[in-house]
Amino acid sequence: MRDRFKKEVNKLAQDYTASIPFDKRLYKQDIAGSIAHAKMLAKQGIISDKEAELITMALTSIREEIEGGEFAFRADLEDIHMNIEARLIEKVGDAGRKLHTARSRNDQVALDMRLFAKEAISQTIEKLVGLQRALLDVAEANKDEVMPGYTHLQRAQPVLFAHHMLAYFEMLQRDVSRFRDCLGRTDVLPLGSGALAGVPYPIDRDFLAKELGFSRISANSMDAVSDRDFVIEYQAAASITMMHLSRLAEELVLWSSAEFGFIELDDAYATGSSIMPQKKNPDVAELARGKTGRVYGNLLALLTVMKALPLSYNRDMQEDKEGFFDTVDTLLSTLEVFTGMIATLKVKGEKTRRAAEEGYILATDLADYLVGKGVPFREAHNIVGGLVQYAVENGKTFKDLSLSEYKNFSSLFEEDVYSVTVASSIGARDVPGGTAPGQVAQQLARARKIVQG
Amino acid sequence: MRDRFKKEVNKLAQDYTASIPFDKRLYKQDIAGSIAHAKMLAKQGIISDKEAELITMALTSIREEIEGGEFAFRADLEDIHMNIEARLIEKVGDAGRKLHTARSRNDQVALDMRLFAKEAISQTIEKLVGLQRALLDVAEANKDEVMPGYTHLQRAQPVLFAHHMLAYFEMLQRDVSRFRDCLGRTDVLPLGSGALAGVPYPIDRDFLAKELGFSRISANSMDAVSDRDFVIEYQAAASITMMHLSRLAEELVLWSSAEFGFIELDDAYATGSSIMPQKKNPDVAELARGKTGRVYGNLLALLTVMKALPLSYNRDMQEDKEGFFDTVDTLLSTLEVFTGMIATLKVKGEKTRRAAEEGYILATDLADYLVGKGVPFREAHNIVGGLVQYAVENGKTFKDLSLSEYKNFSSLFEEDVYSVTVASSIGARDVPGGTAPGQVAQQLARARKIVQG
Amino acid sequence: MRDRFKKEVNKLAQDYTASIPFDKRLYKQDIAGSIAHAKMLAKQGIISDKEAELITMALTSIREEIEGGEFAFRADLEDIHMNIEARLIEKVGDAGRKLHTARSRNDQVALDMRLFAKEAISQTIEKLVGLQRALLDVAEANKDEVMPGYTHLQRAQPVLFAHHMLAYFEMLQRDVSRFRDCLGRTDVLPLGSGALAGVPYPIDRDFLAKELGFSRISANSMDAVSDRDFVIEYQAAASITMMHLSRLAEELVLWSSAEFGFIELDDAYATGSSIMPQKKNPDVAELARGKTGRVYGNLLALLTVMKALPLSYNRDMQEDKEGFFDTVDTLLSTLEVFTGMIATLKVKGEKTRRAAEEGYILATDLADYLVGKGVPFREAHNIVGGLVQYAVENGKTFKDLSLSEYKNFSSLFEEDVYSVTVASSIGARDVPGGTAPGQVAQQLARARKIVQG
Amino acid sequence: MRDRFKKEVNKLAQDYTASIPFDKRLYKQDIAGSIAHAKMLAKQGIISDKEAELITMALTSIREEIEGGEFAFRADLEDIHMNIEARLIEKVGDAGRKLHTARSRNDQVALDMRLFAKEAISQTIEKLVGLQRALLDVAEANKDEVMPGYTHLQRAQPVLFAHHMLAYFEMLQRDVSRFRDCLGRTDVLPLGSGALAGVPYPIDRDFLAKELGFSRISANSMDAVSDRDFVIEYQAAASITMMHLSRLAEELVLWSSAEFGFIELDDAYATGSSIMPQKKNPDVAELARGKTGRVYGNLLALLTVMKALPLSYNRDMQEDKEGFFDTVDTLLSTLEVFTGMIATLKVKGEKTRRAAEEGYILATDLADYLVGKGVPFREAHNIVGGLVQYAVENGKTFKDLSLSEYKNFSSLFEEDVYSVTVASSIGARDVPGGTAPGQVAQQLARARKIVQG
């Protein structure tokens, strides 16, 4: 593309600007786009059917060369588009020289990125659903296990382990929905926008859309070549998903600690130490937690790139690719490895139950007990607050307190206060979304239906 | 809430943790939620109708106190919830002490934030549409103006000014669609989730949802109190919108420069200098460009806050508010001031036209001219590249070149090469989304219909 | 400054661009700068001594008006500079109209920001040292306490609690050093740079620097008005400090959990729950952890603002202030509240010791024991790995294993294997920086000296 | 390191956690560290001299294998450390098995990263100085060229082109200073910290420091293995540098536009279009501007990774590498390519001069002219504001105005008002840091001395 220049590009500048090291990953999309473009050109009489056929055959064999590892990518040809075009011209001569009619790299790369993104979104949704299934499996397999629910990492109220897992199911379900919405905005054909102003040929954009599986065509050529919203939106949705996974990862790390001891990761998902022979480390969870940072970074990077760019295409936009590819790879692999890790983890139900029974986790239930006897909630909370303070100071649990000790705080306490238990606490939260066994069973059933749908 | 503590909170710690300086902004939402909660408690027989009535009346008068500036917010009461509850108890005693039955601050604040977010989203969409209308107005008012289209900030191909404006219309249209999707995920009632596990009272969550205008209730109580996805999603959508506005801002700054001189901002939207008397600065556009940074920062801040938090509520989540409020305020005010600025700007059509006619902007059209005579595009591009180099060296424009000079590059050039003009170039791009006048008229009509819909 | 405009500024635009709501915080710096400027102008004969005196007296009384709450800030006067100048002119007429000679708001605001930043840095360093002292105090008060050291949140090797605290001392020491370096680059006088090109008056910049306490004057006027590096550098250093504090916060949260139970926060630094009467939450630590996000966000926001701005001043740069103020406030208050929280926390030494003695934490020591008997480390690691696996399967600790069980894994094990204890393990790490008591005592002494220095 | 596990690691988990694909880049540092470690172990009698010699020779040959491309990296060996150790043991058996005595991967990787960072910082400083030199060269070569100085992208006051270039020199000089400070904090030996607690062997850390070229040893073992401040600090400094370069890039893009036309990039640093034959695009500058985003993203990513990690090593920290390498590569290549681009650009002095002479750029000088006649500056500003408004409305420049027109605005205007020129304006700004030729010459001389130093 240096037809007007008298000088070769400086080697450093060439390496600096070449995108072929990473955009070669788009070869499949680029070739598919070119084949559709050639067919359309022929259909519209802009090139001959013969030429279109030659181009199609040659591009097909170029794809095979690439997949067979026989294609020599050249940095001096800048990018995947020119690498493939150059090879095409080598193979078919003038027909190849006609392929770029009614097209620019600006709409071409927008097309390639949208094709890639559409596939990435589909895979992401599929893997999200895979992890949802694993969460449901482990929830169902441990559906009677009880554990402390936490706020502020302090034991708060007992919950079912399955209820806790279902919270992650919900998060992932929102993620699925967010990626679906993103897909809708990605599913728009930019080809036919030319460099920025449209093309002066009687092209058929609807035909192109149909050939390439798009639902719509872009409505404004300048926007079409300037727009990378769909990449940013994927990055934003991925950031939220990674945030969700980082929360799950944090819990897996906590629960694997000696102090919690709530779960045991399968040996196949744990690693050891180069120096401490006893270590069984939850590295996969830690790494996923860490990789959240890189996905956030990629989001921010592209937002920064696009900030304050005048229309239409600017070379800054070449920076849309590496971070996007990295986020897609990171998210897909994290979802996949989490699916295996969750599917194989062992819940140590005895430990989670014991933890739920210790301490003063039933204090809210005692307050609610008093409310049941007519005490306003705020006053009941106050009374039980005093009771907790008394018990802590005397080194007693609620069960250790005598009825007369109870009565020192409120005369309304009766013998039935001892029937306030972890089981009664859980059972009482029998509202939609609550942790009572029947509610959780319904949530599980509903969730299972969603992932089958 | 310090019933179990023997000591007052440290003053620094109190100031550090108090959210009342900023969450008082949620008073309206908090009171609406409490009124609905009280009604529901009465309907379910958890409190008496009389109590509900007392609560409702008192809360209504508290709202008036706040709006009248007579309410004394207290930092020692931590947050908006306890400030209002304390005042309520002052007013109605035991009935007030019962309001917090079957509720926790955890589901209460989640409710307040969702109510606030829903309203913010509606306002955002409304203001986006307002700006879209202003863009259409200026496009229509200048529908015959021609300007250079740019890539790499180099003049690339001529376009209609209206076409350029429509590119921004498209961006904002995606923004509208993104906020609508966000609204769908925000429109979920969390109340009834209690601290984290649900509540041990026979509440009616569907009634609450109806009272408060929610379409759905949350499916998992732990998720409901741990989830701030809707705030992040708003922040992400706002970041993309600000990115779009920063691009427009950049163009307004460029176009207002002496060098471009394409537009003149109305005096009402420009500012002067403290030292240089001649200056007319596009400060609004510059500031909007700058404020993009703060909106990105708020997005990132919340993503960072939420990373790796174990379930369910953690105090870190209090940090969801200030950044969110700031982003909402920034986005709404930017949209509003842009609407006025766009509506009043003056396009200097003579300057844009002259810029479009200078230079070698018709080079693509010359290549397409040769393609029309049977030259493969890549070869045509090559030929015109040589022609440009020749013209530059000889200080000539295309119009200055003689036919024989043309023919030195290709014998296919004929007299009709001189009919390649800015007008012919624009007219030729007669494809859907292209810049040809007919296409742009269709785009305008379609756009107008969208903002009327 | 609207001398050349025929129209008033639009109200929305005025509110959008006005900085007075936040830059009024710079009144002290602005007045100090103006007094120095007036003195210099008089010294150089640009204004009369009498005028300088009038200006100085009036500015002093304006400062008192502001501090007394009697100053009426006006948004239509845009910023703190014009608000003060307008009031000055009200007070002293023409003398006031001369103050802006040889000055622009561009160098004036750069000066104000640098004066503010210098003070902020000094306060930050002071508060860092305060927290370091608290860490040393708690380390010394608990200097014999033993706890598990962790990697991957798995118990790894026993350490002294004081050693652990000293790790944070080191981090903060790097922070101090980083802020000192930042101070060096901030301590540069920009005044005299004018709007961008310098000023056409015989000013004395060295005099100004001396008056205002700067070590150096800026070397290039365009840079001086375009530069906000010092704000970004503060933000970056603050981000690293907050990252350090977030790690400490995370540990305080973990250690306060029922599962760890290593410390008890003083009641004055803990908060309760609106619904769960038993809760004692480490809210201060959680909030600090959360506030890390906002400080990161502010850093990123300003980096984004400054990206790709052409020289010299652009209005985008007004966005340097709010985020900076917020970061300074957040960092200072977090350091202060941590100092109190650390100073009052209670280490539960019995619990930390028991945790250090459980499990297989001495496995590395057993490997080192074998190395001492001539086994290559990698092989020793291998042997002890097998031993751990055997012990886990048989539900035994190392102490429970008989010598013959040991010998099944290596015949080199002898009776003295039982003298491998937590104490011997800690004592053996007697290298500079290691956890042996003597080393830790030295580290403490060195640290104490640093904070006294 | 799976001695205690009964199961192989899952293949997905292995791939997910393996760092060898990127940490192999640290082979040189890892081997240097191991050789020094072996020497020290021998010197201290922990291994024999013979063993140390064997290890050293084998490691040397392993380095050659790697550099010769003959080394087979294995993902199942996780990382560069274990890959090299495994090969070492293959080569020398038991001596190799002893190398890991008194060491852990935790202090080993901290060492490798610090060695790498030290070298990266040195290279960065070198390349910064290289670009500074190029800026000085172009400034000196065009030292008489005049251009408009801008604020708000509006022509503000005339400046020397050299003065403008020197502003960038100053920015880069701060960058140099920032990287030097970072080097000071990086130059600390972590080896000898073991896994986290120090090592139970009589090692000599000072010897290690000397061997490996470190100025100091770390003071606390837990900090030493937990600390990645030096990587973050590099990233922060790099972000500021890229911000500076993005500003320069923006100006190069602006100046290369047809509208400005201030410079012409050398053909060797420009690229063409696939469709528009006339295009000469400043791609290098655009890409550098875009790459600013990725460097910001890498900074943010690591800050996010490190947030709230409990001590000491956590696997999340493996994420410190890729972003760091990417930032180093990006920064070094950007500096290098800018050096060439700046060195070869051509300033179109006639165009910059003409731009400086157009419009009302001398308005400040007119105000200062009136100040010279006794008018208070604020009033003078006011008068000239009116003059500008009058001139604009009448389509006149200052030169076009008659003396009587001047006098309509102030009777103090005399014939000498016509001697206010671009040259007089520039010459008058004769203050340190100002744009007067003598001042700029001094700045140039001082700058030249700095880069020679």
Image (cartoon, coloured by chain):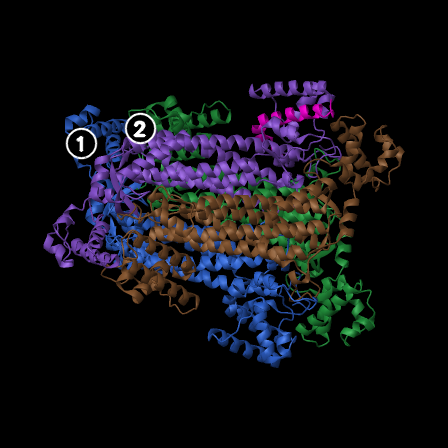
Chain colours: A green, B blue, C brown, D purple
Instruction: Work out whether residue A169 can be spotted.
Output: yes
Task: Name the residue: 81% across, 71% down.
Answer: A405
Q: Amino acid at mark 2?
A: Asp
Residue B392: quarter of image: top left
Tag count in the figure?
A: 2
Per the picture, the main secondary structure of the magenta-coloured stretch is helix
Dot 1: chain letter: B
Considering only vertical position in the picture, is C274 above or below B371? below
The image position of residue C370, as x and y in percent, is: 80, 30
Q: Nearer the viewer, residue B144 or A153?
A: A153
Task: Name the residue: 34% across, 57% down.
Answer: B338
Neighbours of disc 2 within 10 Å: few (<14), some (14-19), many (20+): many
* Residue B31 shown in magenta: no
Dot 2: chain letter: D
Judge left or right: residue A87 versus residue D21.
Answer: left
The image position of residue B332, as x and y in percent, is: 40, 59
Q: Nearer the viewer, residue C418 or A155?
A: C418
The circle drawn on residue D267 is 2
For numbered disc 2, what is the local secondary structure?
Answer: helix
The circle drawn on residue B396 is 1
* Residue D27 shown in magenta: yes
Q: Nearer the viewer, residue A405 or D410?
A: D410
Q: What is the magenta range?
A: D18-47
Q: Nearer the viewer, mark 1 or mark 2?
A: 2
Neighbours of disc 1 within 10 Å: few (<14), some (14-19), many (20+): some
Judge left or right: residue D223 versus residue D351.
Answer: right
The quarter of the picture where the N terminus of chain A appears is: top left
The image position of residue D353, as x and y in percent, is: 22, 39
